[in-house]
Amino acid sequence: MEKTLSAGVMGLGLLLAGSAYADDGLHVIQGGPAYFSAGLGVFNGAGVRDANGYNAKLPEVNLEYQSASKLFGIGALWGMVANTNGGFMGYTGFYSDIAWDRWVLTPVLGFGGYNQGRGKDLGSIFQFRLELGLAYQFADQSRLGIKIAHISNAKIVPQDPGEYEVLVTYAIPLSFGDHS
């Protein structure tokens, strides 16, 4: 997880730096509206099996608010994810929107608290969340996309099975957060 986290942060930095010089329309979105996003998908879609060899793939929902205010193309977000076994995570973090034509790539680095419910034990309450979303932005600025995510405690405790998610998302722009 530490290597993944480092690679993700470094990749985000390279994308932000490189997009400032792109001539082909690739750019970091600096302004625009806030977004409310809802996603449906699979919790633990490719997760590590537990000690008994079990790897439950559960339906899940993800709700996320992305602020319109950004500093150097990086904004704040708040979200939650919940699965059908009562497991849920509330999180906060940072995101950036990198656009090319009508396509928007959104990397996220977050952290928060996880409650396993009757589901997978991730080793601790404190968890990190990495996301990478790709969405098509319509003329009304709404977005339809797919998101992959990973939750892990980054080995802050010995047990760190982690879990991976795949979600289909729809995001709507919120006019009260427009900072164009």
Image (cartoon, helix red, strand yellow):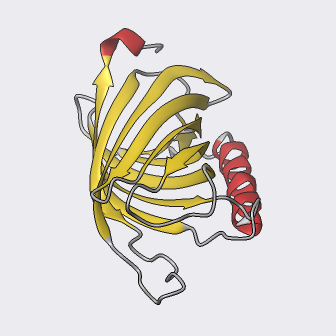
User: Is residue 107 something that shows in the picture?
Assistant: no
* Rendered position, 124 above or below 92: below
Q: Nearer the viewer, residue 110 or 173?
A: 110
Question: Looking at the image, which residue is at 62% across and 63% down?
Answer: 123
Question: Looking at the image, which residue is at 66% across and 58% down?
Answer: 153
Please give left or right for residue 100 compared with residue 84 in the image.
Answer: right
Name which quarter of the figure residue 166 lies in.
bottom left
Residue occupying the far top of the picture? 176
Name which quarter of the figure residue 71 lies in.
top right
* Rendered position, 178 above or below 159: above
Please give left or right for residue 177 compared with residue 111 in the image.
Answer: left
Give percent across and percent down for residue 146: 34, 57
Give percent across and percent down for residue 43: 37, 64
Question: Looking at the image, which residue is at 56% across and 43% down?
Answer: 113
Q: Nearer the viewer, residue 155 or 29?
A: 155
Please give left or right for residue 118 compared with residue 28 in the image.
Answer: left
Give percent across and percent down for residue 165: 41, 63
